[in-house]
Amino acid sequence: MFAKRIILILAYSLSAGFSFSVTCAQELILVENQTSSYQIILPENPEVQEIQAAKVLQDYLQRISGASIPVIHDDGEPKVQEILIGKVNRAEVKEVKVEDFGQDGHYIGTKGEKLLIMGGSRKGVIYGVYAFLENYLGCKKYTSKVDHIPSQSTIRLGQIDALEIPVFSFREVFYEDVYDPEFMDWHRLHSFGGRGSSPTEWGYWVHTFHQLLNPEEYGESNPEYFSYYDGKRHAGLIPSWDGKSVQPESQLCLTNPEVLEIVSENLQKAIDQKPEARYWSVSQNDNVNYCQCENCAALDAQYAAFAPEEKMYKTHGSEYPALGMGSMLTFVNKVAERFPDKIISTLAYQYTRVPPRDLVPAKNVNIMLCSIESTRNEPIETGDVEFSEDLQGWGKLTDNILVWDYTIRFSHLVSPFPNLRTLQPNIQFLKQNRVSAVFEQGNIQSGGEFAELRAYLLTKLVNDPEVDIQKEMDDFLLAYYGQAAGHIKAYINLVHDHNQGSTGRKLSIFGSPIQEKDSYLTPELIKAYNLIFDKAEHAVRQEPNHLQRVKSARLPVSYAMLEIEKDISGDQWELFETKEEGRARLPSEVSELLYDFVYHCLRTNVSRLSEWHTPPKEYLEKYPIIKKGE
Ligand SMILES: [Zn+2]
């Protein structure tokens, strides 16, 4: 009893006579009835991120409570009630070990009546402020435009002592809306290409052999620098898949010593142009035509984890043994040795995906592993055992792994794709296997099935693979769809419950809604989805923003109906007798659906219906074109 009294008296004397503070050994009152006695303290010579962090905090505290809290430098006399931002000159700050935070870690803590927010060398302190707003003040940022800022005239805080260091060192969620500068800072996101507010650490990202040794420059004079297969060297260029540009037809001959010299020389030139970039990709071109000359084949065989007949991978319709990592990693390790201050990244993709045996990536080599082949109706760990084995193998060789993961149906961006239940187990699986960086490829185009929801869930997951994702989803649905949230959730559950059914088929990122007629797009289910969306639209009929979002969520169902209807009935549609060959007179219920679909796409700025092509207007023009008898 007596000891307690002493503590209370001490607290009282330290708090310079504010009688309420006696109870506040447990509690800070940042704002009371819209006024605050606090000051936000910055270092005398602050860094840019510290200034940004202080201004963000000042802005949000004002928006929440109406209180205006001054931002001042730390050169004045310390006061009892202060919010300390970054490396300020205060005894309380000196006790915290900032050097343990890494680049992006942050610390939020209370000491007496002081609140401390500090962070690692990159943007840690900014992340700290946004984490404080979200975790302690209930602020939310769902999309670049949809947020929740609670209104409260008094802000009380309990004691806080929270250090958070991100699980992955690189976190990119590839969705157009994500690159809003505040969204990125709020959710601690990166961009390899320097989009939004993220300065990039990447000099070259991927598929760089042709940049480092160009077939246009050397193809004719030195064909021996390029892949040997089918009895000759292949040093040419072929049309790119976009039909507009050209790409190399093959790879480099990685055992030719001159190739190493030229690649190193050109890499040095590129680094000189961008010396601040840390990661440099030295990686295969986007084809599987690797060199099978005697020397390259010998290295591939020497380090192969299996014999060619044991394991074959089938991707993009072609079959090839995934055996090319021996010559690749030998080469990349040599390049890395010449650039010890940089991290040399290389792909483990298609023919190089399998980890080698008896060959380890150099310390400054990053392995970029791509899960492009994996099925999406079940978690990768069980759904794609071959990829899982490869990832586990790489995890035993290094922890410098970036996984490039794919999360949508790229061939039909606006069609139902029930893979939401796999997002969390997939990211957890990456973490368990020492993956240190994640690139989650979604839809970089505007629009797409549940684009905002998907971006939000992935954003939460790359920051915390163990997050309560169902709670985050419910929270998002309520904020984003208002009174229709329950209906949207019912739709999501129904479509996921019927994902692939008993078909035994894989859910590919390159599939089509037509092939799902027997699984989650049967006539009965489509009817059920439409009933749900009717109810959802009705629930928010007087809320224009929510209604528009519900209509966007419905677009994939309409698109699936259009695709399936054309596939089933297109042959029977009567053709117009015009110069335009094959243009059908659409049944009125089809044209109505088509016009509604395209109109809403245009109105909500849906830019493409497929990853690389088909803007909505083109879909409208081409839909009625029928090629009979094909
Ligand atoms: Zn070769």
Image (cartoon, grey):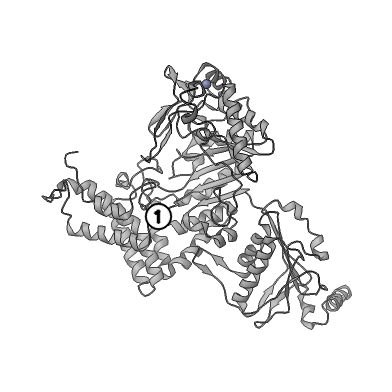
Q: Which residue is drawn at 44% across and 69% down?
A: 482
Does residue 591 appear to the left or right of 94 in the view shown?
A: left
Residue sticking out furthest to the left: 577
Residue 206 in the image: x percent, y percent?
52, 39
Quarter of the image for the C terminus: give it. Answer: top left
Quarter of the image for the N terminus: give it. Answer: bottom right
Number of dots carrying numbers = 1
Does residue 464 appear to the left or right of 107 in the view shown?
A: left
**Residue 80 visible in the current orientation:** yes
- Which of the 4 image quadrants contains residue 549? bottom left
Does residue 594 appear to the left or right of 204 in the view shown?
A: left
Q: Which residue is drawn at 43% across and 29% down?
A: 249
Q: Residue at x 60, y 75 (%)?
A: 64
Residue closer to the observer: 155 or 613: 613
Residue 433 in the image: x percent, y percent?
60, 40
- On screen, residue 327 above or below 439: above
Please, what secondary structure does the residue beneath circle 1 have? loop
Residue closer to the observer: 616 or 245: 245
**Residue 464 visible in the current orientation:** no
- On screen, residue 550 above or below 560: below
Q: Residue at x 50, y 49 (%)?
A: 423
Residue closer to the observer: 39 or 240: 240
Residue 135 in the image: x percent, y percent?
63, 65
Residue labelled 1 has its Cβ within 8 Å of some atom of ligand 1: no
Residue 395 in the image: x percent, y percent?
61, 36
- Which of the 4 image quadrants contains residue 585? bottom left
Within 10 Å of disc 1 (Cα), the crowding (few <14, some 14-19, many 20+) is many
Residue closer to the observer: 598 or 564: 598
Location of mark 1 (residue) = 448
Give amino acid for label 1. Answer: Gly
